[in-house]
Every structure is written in C-alpha cells, then in structure tokens.
C-alpha cells in the first residue's frame, strides 16, 4: 500500500518533525506559563498606566492570526529581534 | 507612506479591501455549515445509540486533535483527487473541473468549527435542567415545540460565550487559506510585501485589520450575551 511505504521510507523525517513540534510546544508553554501569572496579577491589580498597555497587548495578541504575527515577527527591524 | 495604502493603481488599498472581502465572506459562509455540523455532532454524541455515539466522538476527537492546516491540505489535495476519480468514471478523459480553494477552505474550516462547536453545544445541552423539559411535556408540548421554545433559547444562552470565542478563532483561522492560493487578506498582504519590500508596515496593517474585526466581534458578542441573559437574575 502506498501510504505504508511512504511512512516506512520517511519515518526518520517524521520523527524529526515530531521532536521539533514537542520542543516548540514545551518551550512555548514554558515561557507563556512563566509570564502569564504575572500578566494576570498586573491585569487585575495594577494602576491605569500599566493596565492600558497590558490590555491592548492582550487584546491584540488574541485578536490577530498567528500566521500574520509570525510573518510580522520575522521582519521586525533588526534592533527588536535576537539573532537565532 | 499613506499613498501606499491608497485606493487605485498606485496604492495597495483596493487589493487589501478585496482580500478583506474574501476573508470575511469565507468566515460568514463557514459559520452556518459549521454550526449545523456542530449540532449534528452533539446529537450523535448524546444519542442513546452506540454507533452514533462512537461516530460523534471519533469526529470530534480527530478534528480537534489535528492541526487545522493539515485538515485544509487534506481537503484541498485529497478532495480534488476524489473529484478527479469520479469525473473520469463518468466522463472519461475530459478535463475535470478544478476544486476552488474557496470551497476547499469552507469545507475544511466547517469541519474544524463543527468539532469545536459540538463540544460547546454538548456542554450547553447538558446544563439544561431536566425539570423544565418534563414540565413542557406535562403541559402537552410536542418535541419540536419543546426544542424551539424551551431548549434552544437556553442552549443559546449557555453556548454564546463559547461560540463567540470560536467565531473569533474562525476569523483568524481563515488566514490559513492563504497557503492554498486563495487571495484572502493575508495573501494580498504577502503579495504587497513582495512588491514593495515593506514587510513590517504591511503585516502590521494586516494585523490591525484582523484586530479590528476581532474587537468588533467581541463587542457584538457582548451585546448578544446581554440580550440572551435578559430576565436571568444573577445570584
């Protein structure tokens, strides 16, 4: 069967991809998990000067597609990105 | 700067508006199909018959557990293979019609929306109080009447926050169709970037447009929720 042979031939690549997926998920949720509690506390308790930018940030991140965000990030001016 | 976004041959304003139109119409057309699929999936999952229950559970688990991008690719490539096969069965070597990426997008997004909506609606169905349904039976309402007059208004109230979230997700996920060559907002932005070499400005503009759509949706959702919750006292 074609499907099985594709998998047998390419399984190392699938494995590589899966590992990358797990790595990204782990790192992403780690960073988010560290930042989120503080964001939540500030969002609830901070004064208006901190609240307004925070609310805008949260609304913006929730309201725009990930794909658009990613494309935009890649092209941020060099001063705003770290070299990877 | 501003003339870049102007309307007409010099600027990219009209292209972006055309993309925005595709994005919005894709989401609006997907919504009813997705909701119908969601109701069907909930009906299956809560049905007393075991095969139906299995079917509903399998559909929701698979669609919720695979990336939407993958679903889109499967529908876009797989469905055209099936269409070609059927076409050659009937018409021999005549050139098969091309499956439009708009229709593939609607099918894939509806499948995904239906699975998530099914889960939201299941929660809503299960929060209905049995006593009210029994009371409706007692005064002689038919099943259809019970559904329209007792169940549906309350399901609407319970499901609205979840469905609103899903709608915003749907609006954002339409950006995925840009990878199957449908000229939505994100793809038009990409084309503009390729031509003007101003990625930061154009992607920021696209983000702001999507943001405006999301904020508008949230506002409307708030109004709808207030209307659906009228007459309910908060404890």
Image: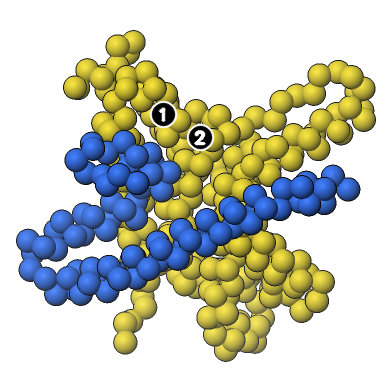
Chain colours: A blue, B yellow
Please report the residue visible at 43 percent of the width from the left and 60 percent of the height from the top: B165
Q: Residues within 10 Å of mark 1 (few under 14, many from 20)?
A: many
Classify mark 2: helix, strand or loop.
Answer: helix
Left or right, residue B7 beside residue A24: left
> How many marks can you see?
2
Q: Which residue is mark 2?
A: B178
Q: Nearer the viewer, residue B191 or B33?
A: B191
Q: Residue furthest top?
A: B9
The x and y percentages for residue B67 are 57, 54
Q: Is residue B179 above or below residue B218?
A: above
The lab-note entry on whether marks 1 and 2 share a chain reads yes
Disc 1 to disc 2, C-alpha distance? 9 Å
Tell me the chain of label 1. B
Classify mark 1: helix, strand or loop.
Answer: helix
The x and y percentages for residue B173 are 48, 47
Residue B190 is tagged as: 1
Left or right, residue B184 beside residue A61: right
Q: Quadrant of residue B117?
A: bottom right
Please report the residue visible at 51 percent of the width from the left and 42 percent of the height from the top: B176
Q: Quadrant of residue B188?
A: top left
Q: Nearer the viewer, residue B98 or B151?
A: B98
* Disc 1 to disc 2: CB gap under 8 Å: yes
Let me know if residue B149 appears in the view: no
């Amino acid at each position: 069967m074609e499907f099985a042979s594709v998998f047998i031939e390419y399984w190392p690549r699938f494995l590589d991809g899966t590992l990358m997926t797990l790595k990204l998920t782990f790192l992403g949720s780690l960073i988010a998990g560290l930042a989120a509690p503080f964001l939540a506390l500030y969002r609830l308790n901070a004064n208006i000067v901190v609240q307004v930018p925070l609310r805008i940030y949260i609304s913006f991140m929730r309201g725009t597609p990930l794909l658009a965000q990613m494309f935009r990030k890649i092209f941020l001016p060099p001063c705003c990105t770290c070299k990877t | 700067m501003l003339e870049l976004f102007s309307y007409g041959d010099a600027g990219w304003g009209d292209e972006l508006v055309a993309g925005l139109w595709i994005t919005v119409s894709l989401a609006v057309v997907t919504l009813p199909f997705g909701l119908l699929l969601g109701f069907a999936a909930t009906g299956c999952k809560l049905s007393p018959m075991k095969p139906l229950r299995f079917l509903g559970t399998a559909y929701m688990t698979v669609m919720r557990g695979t990336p939407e991008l993958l679903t889109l690719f499967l529908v876009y490539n797989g469905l055209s293979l099936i269409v070609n096969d059927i076409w050659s069965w009937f018409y021999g070597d005549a050139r098969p019609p091309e499956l439009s990426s708009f229709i593939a997008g609607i099918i894939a997004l509806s499948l995904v929306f239906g699975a998530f909506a099914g889960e939201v609606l299941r929660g809503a169905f299960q929060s209905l109080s049995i006593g009210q349904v029994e009371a409706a039976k007692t005064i002689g309402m038919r099943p259809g009447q019970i559904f329209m007059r007792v169940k549906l208004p309350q399901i609407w109230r319970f499901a609205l926050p979840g469905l609103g979230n899903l709608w915003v997700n749907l609006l954002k996920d339409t950006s995925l169709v840009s990878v199957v060559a449908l000229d939505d907002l994100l793809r038009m932005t990409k084309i503009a970037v390729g031509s003007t070499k101003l990625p930061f400005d154009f992607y920021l503009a696209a983000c702001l447009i999507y943001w405006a759509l999301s904020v508008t949706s949230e506002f409307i959702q708030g109004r709808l929720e207030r209307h659906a919750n009228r007459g309910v006292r908060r404890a």
